[in-house]
């Protein structure tokens, strides 16, 4: 039986009179890749922000490695985040810094490691993601796929136990997206880390997922191994897998209340 990395119980999120997440309960296994899947507006990105401690839920609990994070102070949450790496959708690199400086930033901020060692660590992380030799490039000089890899190198800087991806394939051509999927597989196999990926891209899901959490209108429609998802006869799941998902339609006011678009 798999050890649990993250346990979510009765998670609810409300913005004004709109309930975005409606009592989610699931347990993400340690050392596996879990994909959070669903159509636009289903609550994927909101859930991710809860898991990394950027949002507090209206109700419910989130336990990471046995530690309840919804009651932590900001300094206590920072301790938990040091064990996390996050690749945001747009890579979120600092344009005024070189790629090496971007990767070094969390090491400088959170450790007292000397500069020579930091430079070695940075080169190792860049080599790991296939960017050896690009140390002195700036983000503006990189392609979209290379920016994602640089963002991933920074996410790996502190050797996290958990790695979070927010729509890693967004804006990438199919070949580049497949290359990033291969890199995720390589990392999981090499380090056995817990990986959580938010996406709506089915090719990526089929390529990388061990487990899948499928959301629909703020609820868990499915949670389990990928193979069980593929063989499910639930009509809503079949609709998604056969690419006949109807996008939710919200008013502009709904989106402002939801704050974080999915």
Image (cartoon, helix red, strand yellow):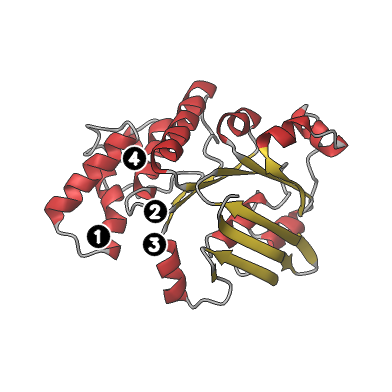
Question: Along the polypeptide, which appears first: circle 4 or circle 3?
Answer: 3
**Circle 3 sits on which residue?**
82
* Secondary element at image label 2: loop
Whole-percent x, y for residue 238 in the image: 81, 32
Query: In this orientation, which residue lies closer to the viewer: 14 or 258?
Result: 14
* Secondary element at image label 1: helix
Residue count near mark 2 (Cα–Cα under 10 Å), binned few <14, some 14–19, many ≥20: some
Whole-percent x, y for residue 129 in the image: 35, 35
Q: Is residue 226 left or right of residue 123?
A: right
Q: Nearer the viewer, mark 4 or mark 1?
A: 1
Question: Along the polypeptide, which appears first: circle 1 or circle 2?
Answer: 1
As displayed, is residue 27 above or below residue 95? below
Residue drawn at point x = 25 percent, y = 40 percent: 124
The reply to whether residue 57 is visible in this rendering is no
**Are discs 1 and 3 less than 8 Å apart at CB?**
no
Whole-percent x, y for residue 54 in the image: 54, 64
Name the mark on residue 139: 4
**Are discs 3 and 2 less than 8 Å apart at CB?**
yes
**Circle 1 sits on which residue?**
108
**Circle 2 sits on which residue?**
160
How far apart, in angstroms, are the residues tagged by discs 1 and 2? 15 Å
As displayed, is residue 94 above or below residue 53? above
**Are discs 4 and 1 less than 8 Å apart at CB?**
no
Q: Nearer the viewer, mark 2 or mark 4?
A: 2
| Outermost residue to the left | 116
| Outermost residue to the top | 175
Residue drawn at point x = 42 percent, y = 75 percent: 75
């Amino acid at each position: 039986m798999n050890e649990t990395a993250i346990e979510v119980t009765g998670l609810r999120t409300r913005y004004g009179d709109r309930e975005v997440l409606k009592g989610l309960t699931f347990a993400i296994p340690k050392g596996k890749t879990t994909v959070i899947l669903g159509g636009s507006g289903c609550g994927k990105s909101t859930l991710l922000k809860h898991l990394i401690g950027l949002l507090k839920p209206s109700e419910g609990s989130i336990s990471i490695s046995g530690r309840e994070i919804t009651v932590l102070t900001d300094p206590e949450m920072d301790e938990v985040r040091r064990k996390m790496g996050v690749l945001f959708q747009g890579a979120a690199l600092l344009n005024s810094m070189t790629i090496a400086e971007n990767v070094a930033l969390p090491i400088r901020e959170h450790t007292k490691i000397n500069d020579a060692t930091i430079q070695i660590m940075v080169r190792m992380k860049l080599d790991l993601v296939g960017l050896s030799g690009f140390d002195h490039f700036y983000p503006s000089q990189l392609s979209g796929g290379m920016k994602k890899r640089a963002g991933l190198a920074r996410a790996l800087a502190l050797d996290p136990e958990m790695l979070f991806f927010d729509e890693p394939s967004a804006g990438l051509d199919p070949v580049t997206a497949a290359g990033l999927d291969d890199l995720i597989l390589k990392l999981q196999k090499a380090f056995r880390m817990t990986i959580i990926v938010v996406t709506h891209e089915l090719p990526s899901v089929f390529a990388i997922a061990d487990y899948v959490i499928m959301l629909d209108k703020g609820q868990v429609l499915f949670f389990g191994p990928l193979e069980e998802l593929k063989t499910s006869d639930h009509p809503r799941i079949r609709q998604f897998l056969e690419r006949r998902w109807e996008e939710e339609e919200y008013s502009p006011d709904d989106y402002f209340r939801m704050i974080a678009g999915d």
